[in-house]
Amino acid sequence: MCNFVLQPMNRKVNNIKELADQLKLSPTTVSRVLNGKSEIYRISETTSKKVIAAARKFHYYPNRIARGLKLEKTETLGLIIPDIANPYFGSIAKTIEVEAHQKGYSIILCDSLDDVETETELLYLLAGRKVDGIIIAPTGKSNEHVVELQQQGIPIVVIDRYLPGTSLPFITTDNYAGALMAVKHLLEKGHQQIACIQGNQGISANSDRVKGYVDAIHTKGIGLNEDWILGDDFGEENGYLQTKNLMALADKPTAIFALSNLISLGILRALKELGLTVPDDVSVVSFDEQPYSAFLACPMTTVEQPREEIGNMAINLLLKNISEGNAVNLNSAMLQPRLIVRESVKNINI
Amino acid sequence: MCNFVLQPMNRKVNNIKELADQLKLSPTTVSRVLNGKSEIYRISETTSKKVIAAARKFHYYPNRIARGLKLEKTETLGLIIPDIANPYFGSIAKTIEVEAHQKGYSIILCDSLDDVETETELLYLLAGRKVDGIIIAPTGKSNEHVVELQQQGIPIVVIDRYLPGTSLPFITTDNYAGALMAVKHLLEKGHQQIACIQGNQGISANSDRVKGYVDAIHTKGIGLNEDWILGDDFGEENGYLQTKNLMALADKPTAIFALSNLISLGILRALKELGLTVPDDVSVVSFDEQPYSAFLACPMTTVEQPREEIGNMAINLLLKNISEGNAVNLNSAMLQPRLIVRESVKNINI
DNA sequence: ATTATCTGCACAAACGTTTGCGCAAATTCC
DNA sequence: GGAATTTGCGCAAACGTTTGTGCAGATAAT
């Protein structure tokens, strides 16, 4: 690469040796000064000041690859998420990145596309890049690759879900409680025929939400219609198809509990096609609050998850595990969601 | 760290020396086999097979930090975005990560919070981490730090905007054309009193959209009301406040052109508070299509940006510049947006 | 039998940083 | 004056990989 350009006299140095040469010192001295160890190694104040001034003058910044090799610490963290385009995960990722940056870490972003093979490959890739720790929202289809890396000593924190049968620490919403409050709200408004359109059944967030839905209905002493628990994907298309299926039943539900924001958008699309409206024809409560929830055709009643708190607690738990270096420290948490009541549930007691 | 656990006989090796020791070979031989260079260095097939089997058996994966130091190539890319929680940037980030992963690269995610000092710090941090290239949606408040790193030989591609007065390659929407078609649509429906709520004025995406808005109005031969170009942030709060300001004017506009999806959510919130509806009281056209745009109280007419294409072209341009190693190769592109006509514009010709 | 060539692998240096240990000169103490 | 101590810095090894170059034994050619 021919990159010969006229530059000012004080041009850049490319490594610590060149900077040391400029100062007629050794790389040892320069390294110690720049790492704030002047006093420990009895480097004179005069020399220290010279080094700092020269680093600035010659635009020196250390090669963190070399530093990472020597220190066996890269100050990087892996973040594996099933869909970064999903605003829910985008919010969590933002919180994690901002906090990580403040604590001197960089984030390697990995999108698993909710595919277990991609996820496994990404995990080993992160291991090879010697990340100091990993935050993951696992696909849930298999746990052993996650557990194996934890056993190799890589601190891992799970978010948005947990992995049953493992000791992996996690930060998630209390999905069971969120589902309970959502379905209780529907029951209070007189709904007894409540369908549930679920997502990926392999993850605990879904299982816990379904369990909350089932238990709320049982608590009311009414029967559960198994035909009204359907779907297997958190995406919009699944919401759309399952709503079409529901509305084709002779025994239609009066309300639908959507387990994700994308599912509820699919519900809206299907109902619109069928000429049905929320809440007159069908009531809807949806998991996850979005910036647009209040502005939908019918402002949506939602279960708000504490995304920033999930991100913050996850990153800080991970950093604590990294610095304390023992994998038995696990302060898992299930955070309280919040029901935001708007207009998408019709009171049919009247 | 005490991590002593019973493991199967074939336990993991931690580096290539240990693997070589197991095979009674040199690290040289192992490295060449695993890097697919057996034939070039005349390593026998028997030995090759042994190496590959042992790597698998002992769960060996190479330390990419050491490899990056030796090869002076880390196979990492920096991605600097002003707000990863914004679904627009989330979509672009997803496309970039997926394509990068397929091509063997990892993405270091950096959220600049739309702050130029944070952005500068992140740029130098990425330089220190020896990323092979950088994709950035710059804050636009200053260019010199971006240009300086380009001049140091780091391939950089700008997305969502361009940096005037620099030679930095970019992939962006043709914002001018998008604004033209949006405002022409309003004009065709009889609107002559059209306000524009803009975002961050320091970036080209905003400037080009404003210019498109202005030129479309001038083309109609009608006067431009400078009071109707307001705002300075792409956020929801700005949309809300400026809509309140607009509706407080004696000379109210009949339509608003929102330069971002968050601005248009703010518009909706303000109008709702004022008891006004879209499109009866005010028509709205908004930049950027969202999954929810069709399901708003009034389905929104939007300018759809080709996000996946932006992401794909950006990552592929960057990888091309990395492999070709000359910064004069610039295949910048402005991609065509698309107007999606829904119901948020009232025909006032009637 | 000797020399030339081939085969199958290894030695040692390098990438850029950090640090345990130590050197040489200056200063202090007896 | 000589020994002990302090001062101000540097040497060289190491982290884990890759590769230019080369070695030693086997084989082929003369």
Image: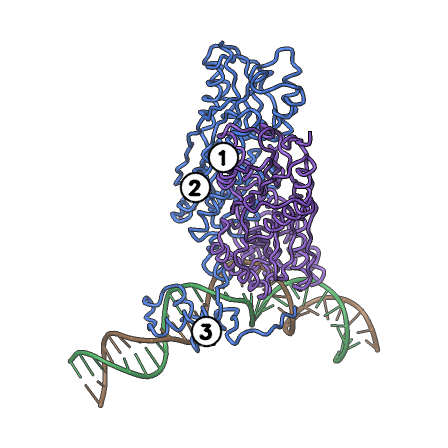
Chain colours: A purple, B blue, C brown, D green
Circle nearer the N terminus (2, 3): 3
Instruction: Estimate the x, y position of residue A189 in percent, counting from the top left.
Output: 68, 34
Where residue B20 is drawn, which disc sits there? 3
Q: Quadrant of the N terminus of chain B?
A: bottom right
CA–CA distance in space, label 3 to label 1 = 49 Å
Q: Is residue A308 visible?
A: no
- Kindly identify which chain the residue marked by label 3 belongs to: B
Q: Label 3 amino acid?
A: Ala
Does any portion of residue B109 appear in the rendered image?
A: yes
Residue A209 is left or right of residue B73, and the answer is: right
- Give a yes or no on whether discs 2 and 3 share a subunit: yes
Please give the residue where the numbered disc 2 appears in the rendered image: B312
What secondary structure is found at the residue carrying circle 3? helix
Residue B160's disc number: 1
Element under disc 2:
helix
Estimate the x, y position of residue A119 in percent, counting from the top left.
50, 55
- Respond whether the residues carrying marks 3 and 1 are from the same subunit: yes
- Give neighbour class at mark 3: few <14, some 14-19, many 20+ (Cα, 10 Å): many
Q: Are marks 2 and 3 in contact (CB under 8 Å)?
A: no
Q: Is residue A293 left or right of residue A269?
A: right
Residue at x-position 39% and y-position 37%: B331
